[in-house]
Image (tube, grey):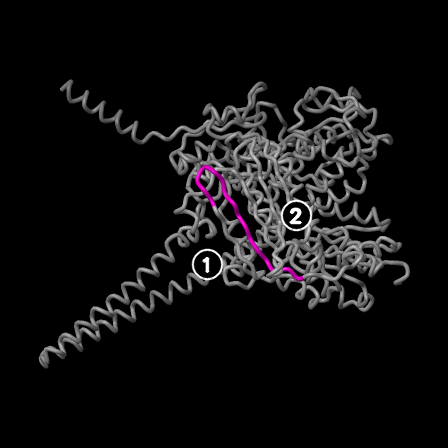
């Protein structure tokens, strides 16, 4: 009997072990309060338990480094700020899952005082800030824009006690919108808030993250925790009173009152539940904007390549479909052809034997074949429709990608233009010029990827405008000097004295081809080696011959024929060691051939490679200056006058356009969307409108049409300023009532030329 009970107890132990929930821990970034209500409700309402998770919620304690805790495995998940983006740029292997608040509640606050009305009044004031620059990056950027330096004020170590502000120990302090203002209101103390969001520095807050290792090894558990937490947050915001009662009973370590928690819940709900944005969303475009701000503050020099796969995105059905679709259709077609052939041969054999009795069988088999054919035709038709859908999805994706990438590029190029005009140091001015040229080259590459299907079909448009060959090649080589110097590589440029200086051609495409080849040569060259670029004029054929000779790793003979194919590289290890997609040489080949030229290479493994291309030249008679330069000079001589309405939802672009218009001594107002623009035109007379297209609530085209319907606005110039820059976009904007079109990133000279046409004094 004793053995029987021992066996029963053993079985119960085994069953309990099997049914035990997986233990998971999450580290919060502050003390318990409504800020973490989603975790509490997911635990207390059983959302975690429903997916077999036993979750431990860890309250913040000073001295904890949340990122290091997650990377070391002390915690499975963490809640952090936007500084997680900077951590990734510093090579910390983390993955972002959700941002619970679309805007950060972290602000500067002061008591209402006559001597603190604007950011410029911060000078000589005592400001209480947290120790690390990373957590106050948005606030630092806000002050930087107002030209407030750290030496202009007294920095006080943060006590996290609002009484220091109330008693006058400090003039300003960093606080959460959802916390400290409540206590000031309780005491009837009026206050002023300085929110970085209002100055264009909009950061995410309370970001759920984990380690890349956890993402790769415990993907299912990660998704279950992520989805259950989101469900907990939605419940918390829909049942605020119930949630607050739970916090008061179980999670109120700060001894907050019910009224304080209600105030906190109201503010946080506004920051989390934003119209038109799915709850918890993290957009890659905003991640890149935040990364750019960290660069401007000098906190990192890393490029956006380090941010790839930072935000977790689940693999979709369409992703899997694209992998198998083409292969499946191909084999269906082969099966159809083979089956048809075999049955046809079978019928011929029967007829040759003149066996009339078997003709009925042949007819029967023929009918079966017809039925089989009809099944196969239906499958092929279905797959064809799915392929057409996939192509449409791809086109939409590429169009959206173009818009999302052009928007941050607009900020980079625009602010570089502004800095160039204000910078007197020639060396710094040259560096800014290189940044600008590199940004434009990146923009060109983006455009080529968007038009890659046209490249494959040989339908890429090639311009024929006047250009200076000597300047183009010298300038591109200069762009790569710093990159070459890093590996102690010398670049030698030899230009044939007989090479025509001016010709007709496509400077953008020529720059891209040459840049691709120079970049490859540097990438695959050994340290302390030399790259020789020879530019020759082939007089007998009137062609340019360009060759780039390196003494690098070379290419094996069996790989030479595939090197110009899309997504091909000489070896699978090349991508791991040197990076790259394998697309550059394919695009270069297509562009050279579109210009009527040829491209090729000679290479010896371990000894180096020589890439070369030829293109026809169209010599131009001597002229004193290029047309584009004349236009720019002419524009600079004109005086501008008027009031401009900027219609733009992106804060960075609002700030950029405003600074550009300031340089032109123009007045301006800002509308955040089409609805605000329509109201602005009703209430004030403007001389010109700069109109974005993609905006929430009402887009630019609809707003333009409504404005045009008003009798007083028929002749008002409306200029499209948009990141939509695909073929046909310009015509679409003009057709819908706009007078002109400027694509993002904005070229300051083009903007100036457009403003001169409509706002120059002599034209009005």
Mark 2 nearby-residue class (10 Å; few <14, some 14–19, many ≥20): some
Looking at marks 1 and 2 on the same chain, the residue that comes earlier in the sequence is marked by 1
> 699 or 169, which lies in front?
699
- Does the magenta portion include 19? no
Q: Is residue 404 left or right of residue 763?
A: left
Image mark for residue 606 = none
Judge by depth and name the residue closer to the eye, 762 or 636: 636
Q: Is mark 1 on a helix, strand or loop?
A: helix
In the image, residue 257 lies at what x, y percent? 63, 28
Which residue is under mark 2? 495
The part of the chain drawn in magenta is 603-618
Residue 361 visible in the current orientation: yes
Residue at 44 percent across and 40 percent down: it is 605
Q: Which residue occupies 31% across, 60% down?
A: 331
Residue 184: where, in percent of width, then height?
A: 74, 29
* Helix, strand or loop: magenta stretch: strand
Disc 1 and disc 2 in contact, CB within 8 angstroms: no
Is 526 displayed left or right of 200 in the figure? left
CA separation in Å, label 1 and label 2:
47 Å
Give residue 171's quadrant in the image.
Answer: top right
Residue picked out by circle 1: 390
Q: 65 or 185, which lies in front?
A: 65
């Amino acid at each position: 009997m004793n053995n029987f009970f021992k066996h029963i107890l053993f079985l119960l132990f085994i069953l309990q072990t099997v049914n035990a929930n997986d233990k998971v821990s999450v580290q919060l970034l502050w003390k318990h309060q409504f800020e973490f209500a989603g975790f509490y409700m997911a635990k207390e309402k059983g959302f975690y338990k429903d997916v077999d998770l036993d979750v431990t919620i860890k309250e913040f304690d000073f001295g904890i480094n949340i990122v290091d805790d997650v990377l070391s495995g002390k915690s499975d998940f963490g809640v952090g700020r936007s500084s997680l983006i900077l951590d990734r740029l510093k090579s910390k292997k983390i993955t972002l899952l959700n941002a619970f608040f679309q805007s950060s509640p972290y602000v500067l606050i002061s008591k209402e005082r006559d001597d603190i009305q604007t950011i410029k009044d911060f000078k000589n004031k005592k400001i209480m800030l947290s120790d690390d620059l990373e957590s106050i990056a948005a606030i630092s950027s806000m002050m930087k824009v107002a030209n407030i330096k750290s030496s202009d004020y007294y920095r006080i170590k943060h006590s996290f006690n609002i009484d220091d502000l109330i008693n006058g120990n400090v003039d300003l302090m960093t606080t959460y919108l959802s916390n400290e203002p409540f206590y000031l209101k309780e005491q009837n103390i009026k206050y002023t808030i300085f929110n970085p969001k209002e100055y264009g520095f909009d950061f995410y807050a309370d970001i759920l993250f984990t380690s890349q290792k956890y993402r790769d090894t415990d993907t299912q558990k990660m998704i279950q925790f992520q989805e259950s937490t989101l469900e907990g947050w939605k419940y918390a915001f829909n049942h605020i009173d119930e949630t607050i009662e739970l916090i008061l009973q179980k999670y109120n370590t700060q001894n907050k009152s019910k009224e304080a928690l209600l105030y906190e819940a109201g503010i946080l709900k506004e920051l989390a539940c934003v119209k038109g944005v799915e709850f918890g969303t993290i957009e890659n475009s905003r991640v890149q904007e935040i990364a750019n701000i960290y660069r401007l503050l000098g906190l990192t020099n890393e490029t956006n390549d380090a941010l790839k796969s930072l935000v977790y995105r689940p693999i979709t059905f369409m992703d899997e479909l694209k992998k198998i679709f083409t292969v499946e259709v191909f084999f269906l077609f082969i099966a159809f052809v083979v089956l048809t052939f075999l049955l046809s041969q079978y019928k011929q054999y029967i007829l040759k034997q003149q066996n009339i009795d078997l003709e009925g069988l042949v007819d029967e088999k023929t009918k079966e074949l017809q039925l089989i054919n009809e099944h196969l035709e239906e499958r092929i038709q279905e797959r064809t429709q799915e392929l057409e859908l996939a192509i449409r999805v791809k086109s939409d994706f590429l169009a959206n990608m173009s818009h999302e990438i052009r928007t941050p590029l607009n900020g980079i190029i625009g602010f570089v233009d502004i800095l160039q005009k204000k910078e007197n140091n020639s060396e710094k001015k040259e560096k800014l010029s290189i940044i600008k040229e590199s940004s434009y080259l990146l923009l060109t590459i983006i455009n080529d990827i968007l038009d890659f299907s046209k490249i494959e079909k040989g339908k890429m448009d090639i311009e024929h405008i006047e250009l200076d060959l000597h300047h183009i090649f010298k300038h591109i080589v200069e762009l790569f000097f710093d990159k070459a110097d890093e590996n102690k590589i010398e670049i030698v440029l030899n230009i044939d004295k007989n090479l025509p200086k001016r010709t007709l051609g496509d400077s953008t495409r020529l720059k891209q081809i040459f840049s691709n080849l120079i970049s490859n040569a540097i990438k695959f060259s050994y340290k302390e080696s030399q790259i020789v670029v020879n530019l020759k004029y082939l007089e007998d054929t009137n062609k340019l011959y360009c060759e780039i000779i390196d003494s690098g790793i070379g290419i094996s003979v069996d790989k030479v024929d595939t090197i110009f194919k899309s997504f091909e590289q000489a070896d699978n290890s090349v991508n791991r060691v040197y990076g790259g997609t394998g697309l550059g040489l394919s695009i270069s080949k297509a562009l050279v051939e579109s210009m009527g030229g040829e491209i090729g290479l000679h290479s010896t493994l371990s000894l180096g490679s020589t890439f070369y291309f030829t293109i026809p030249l169209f010599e131009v008679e001597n002229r004193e200056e290029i047309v584009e330069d004349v236009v720019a000079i002419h524009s600079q001589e004109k005086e501008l006058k008027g009031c401009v309405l900027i219609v733009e939802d992106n804060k960075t672009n609002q700030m950029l356009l405003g600074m550009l218009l300031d340089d032109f001594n123009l007045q301006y107002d800002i509308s955040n969307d089409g609805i605000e623009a329509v109201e602005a035109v009703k209430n004030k007379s403007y001389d010109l409108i700069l109109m974005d297209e993609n905006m929430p609530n009402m887009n630019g085209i609809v707003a333009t049409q409504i404005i045009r319907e008003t009798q007083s606005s028929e002749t008002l110039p409306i200029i499209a300023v948009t990141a939509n820059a695909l073929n046909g976009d310009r015509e679409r904007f003009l057709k819908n009532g706009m007078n002109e079109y400027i694509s993002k990133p904005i070229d300051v000279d083009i903007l100036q030329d457009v403003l001169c046409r409509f706002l120059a004094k002599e034209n009005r």
